Amino acid sequence: MKELSFYREKIDEIDTEILRLLNERAKHVISVGEIKKKNGSPLWVPSREQAIFERLKSLNTGPFPTASIRPIFREIISASLSLEEVQKVAYLGPEGTFTNLAGIKHFGLSAKLIPVRTIPEVFEGVDKGRFACGIIPVENSLEGVVNHTLDMFMNSNLVIMGEIYVEIVQNLMNLTGRMEDVAAVYSHPNAIGQCRQWLSKHLPDTPVFEIESTAKAAEMAKNDETIAAIGSETAEIVYNLKVIERGIEDGAGNFTRFLIIGKTPTEATGRDKTSLMFAVSHTSGALYKALEVFSRGGINMTKLESRPSKIKAWEYLFYTDIEGHKDTLPVKDVLAEFEKSVPLMKILGSYPKGDK
């Protein structure tokens, strides 16, 4: 017992020193915030955060797990930013959705996450300055892209400032936690699509209804024990439901990618991604010829999607993600050459890559 007491006292001493250092850090953060306000600089700088995480991970010698550094310092940075100014972040709500979870994961618990009803409302709120930035879903590894998100970039001046990957674990839940009480299942169409095989096997005769969000489905289940919702663990907690079955999604490694949108371009970090939209002329091989410049320049293209332009019938816009930052070589030179070869090119943003 004396030996145990000795180590506990040592831990208490270290915790006390950590607390002292956190307060010392907070004083410097307040000074930085005052300088930023004088200069009109943005309070949240993604490239600076990324540099902090990468530096600390490179310095870690163990046994403290490197994977835990980012989430711990995420909360330290979140609390520190709140000393400068509480960050208002809009997300596609309501509370309890996976977008809500993405916001907590990226901005921490000290940010003020504000749910809005639609993706256009996220864009509008950020554009008019009601929010520092916004979080919107853009694609799921099983269900594909969120087309409405891509369409919004056509007429928006906002830029992509970051991306967040959230592993999607879908749970079936209701008030009682009993399968035999389920008379109907409600959820968002994407969530239903991700669980279709499980539903066919385990609830083949139970009607399944689509609704605007997983959180709305959880809210309905909260008020009717015959309704089961498919949704996240966050929805389970927010709406006080009981899980019937966890992890009912059909495919393993199911991720949804979310974008952070704002007004301020992000500086290069050395581990970046650039998103852009473009159009090509109506000639044979136009798309192949346009994209050839990326191959010649050694630029890796990680995504390519097409969408109707909504300006003229049978004309399309293309969305692509490439590795690298628009302001660094060789990406800068390749984009300059690419812009000359297409009738339209718009860079949507260069930003730090998200961690899966």
Image: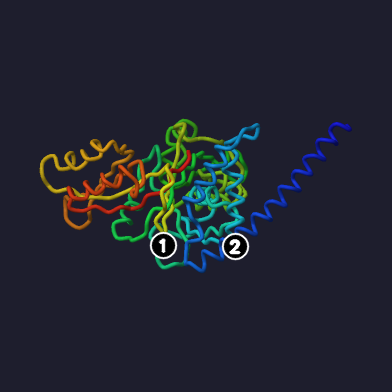
Image coords of residue 43 (percent x, y): 51, 60
Rendering coords of residue 155 (x, y %):
29, 60
Which of the two residues, 238 or 130, is positioned nearer the viewer here?
Answer: 130
* Residue 63 visible in this rendered orientation of the protein: yes
Q: Amino acid at mark 2?
A: Ser
Q: Could you tell me how far apart the alpha carbons at marks 1 and 2 are, in whole angstroms?
A: 34 Å
Side of 295 where 250 appears, left or right: right
For the N terminus, the quadrant is top right
Q: Quadrant of residue 143?
A: top left
Local SS, label 1 = helix
Q: Which residue is mark 2?
A: 31
Q: Residues within 10 Å of mark 1 (few under 14, many from 20)?
A: some
> Relative to 72, does residue 90 appear above or below in the rendering?
below
Residue 179 seen in this snapshot: no
At x 13%, y 39%, the residue is 285
List the residue tagged with mark 1: 121
Residue 60 image position (x, y, % from top left): 60, 36
Rendering coords of residue 338 (x, y %)? 22, 46
Q: How is the image coloured?
A: rainbow
Q: Are marks 1 and 2 in contact (CB under 8 Å)?
A: no
Residue in the picture at 41% in, 59% down: 264
The residue most toward the left is: 283
Q: Amino acid at mark 1?
A: Glu
Sequence-earlier tag: 1 or 2: 2
Tag 2, which secondary structure? helix
